[in-house]
Image (cartoon, rainbow, N blue to C red):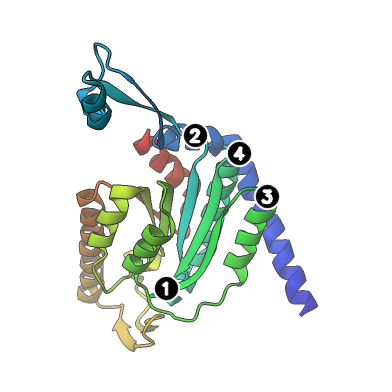
Amino acid sequence: MIEKEGDIFSKVRRIEIKSRGLSSNMFAGQYHSAFKGRGMAFAEVREYQYGDDIRDIDWNVTARFHRPYVKVFEEERELTVMLLVDVSGSLNFGTRAQTKSEMATMIAATLAFSAIQNNDKIGVIFFSDQIEKYIPPKKGRRHILYIIREMLDFQPVSKKTDVGAALEFLGRMQKRRCTAFVMSDFYDPGDFSRPLQVCRSRHDVAGIQLYDPLLKSLPDVGLLRVRDAETGREMYLDTSSKAVRRAHERYWTERMEALGQVFRKNAVDYVSVATDGDFVQALRQLFAVRR
């Protein structure tokens, strides 16, 4: 038990050093320009002036005083950032440098340190096909280290995935507008388009898809036994067959297109990153799109 605690502490410390360095040197400013200013808070009501947007007119106050008044908003100085992290069975898969879960931990830690450098709160929702754990938004280094530790050591109850349930839970728990990052491989048998649409209408949502390169292109290694990490179903694939490899690539392409359509339809920015890829470049791409 002591060795396990020591191992986890060492991993947390290594992740802190790397992710804190990235957020300080690369992401803090880009995060600020990409997400600050999107949260607008009501400040006051004043008389209408020439050039004001008529959509900002407060009709109740206007009717009371018999002359037009407008609502004035200002940039929220403090945002709440929520990380919706998939902890289902398929996130434990990885054939190259790391698993999808390990990649998610690094990305979450980097985003968290970027958030607190901008004086934002950070909270987490761990989800499978149910809400596994909710960590309310707080500030501070100790809070982020607790989040990292939980991501490393957390054991979910279920192995399946329901992205929609996580989005609906966010809507219930977070009444004020927040910035939400959904990190998942999105292997969801259901349709989460409607919950995403509802969540997007209230919050600033971005998607981060994690995938393993083996799932994009099968290697020619002969007969391969594969097991679904979420259902336990096993099957054999003859990877020496060109027809099998082409069918797999076609399935992957169609799946990626369908996922992209869900995000585009709901005006949600997203990025895909492989477990052997550069998540730094992926986050930069996401931030650049939002700017």
Q: In this view, does 101 lie above or below 157?
A: above
* Element marked by disc 3: helix
Which residue corresponds to the image point at 43% horizontal and 79% vertical from the top-left? 159
Residue 197 visible in image: yes
Q: Disc 1 marks which amino acid?
A: Ser
**Could you tell whether 245 is left or right of 39 in the image?**
left
Q: Residue 32 carries which label?
A: 2
In the rendered view, does 182 fall on the left or right side of 193?
Answer: right
Q: What residue type is labelled 3?
A: Arg
Mark 2 residue crowding within 10 angstroms, few (<14) / some (14–19) / many (20+): some
Q: How crowded is mark 1: few (under 14 residues within 10 Å), some or many (20 or more)?
A: many
Residue 11: x percent and y percent? 68, 62
**Which element carries disc 4, helix, strand or loop?**
helix
Quadrant of residue 198 within the rendered picture: bottom left
Q: In which quarter of the image is the N terminus?
A: bottom right
At label 2, which amino acid type do we have?
His
Q: Label 3, label 4: how many angstroms apart (C-alpha)?
A: 10 Å
Q: Distance between the residues labelled 1 and 2?
A: 30 Å
Q: Is residue 24 above or below residue 150?
A: above
Which element carries disc 2, helix, strand or loop? helix
The image quadrant where one finds the C terminus is top left
> Is label 3 in contact with label 1 (beta carbons under 8 Å)?
no
Asked if 244 appears above or below 260 in the picture, the reply is below
Asked if one can make out residue 98 in the rendered structure from this viewpoint, the answer is: no
Residue denoted by label 1: 128
Distance from disc 3 to disc 2, alpha carbons, whole Å, reads 18 Å
63 lies above or below 18: above
| Labels 4 and 1: the sequence-earlier one | 4
Q: Which mark is residue 117?
A: 4
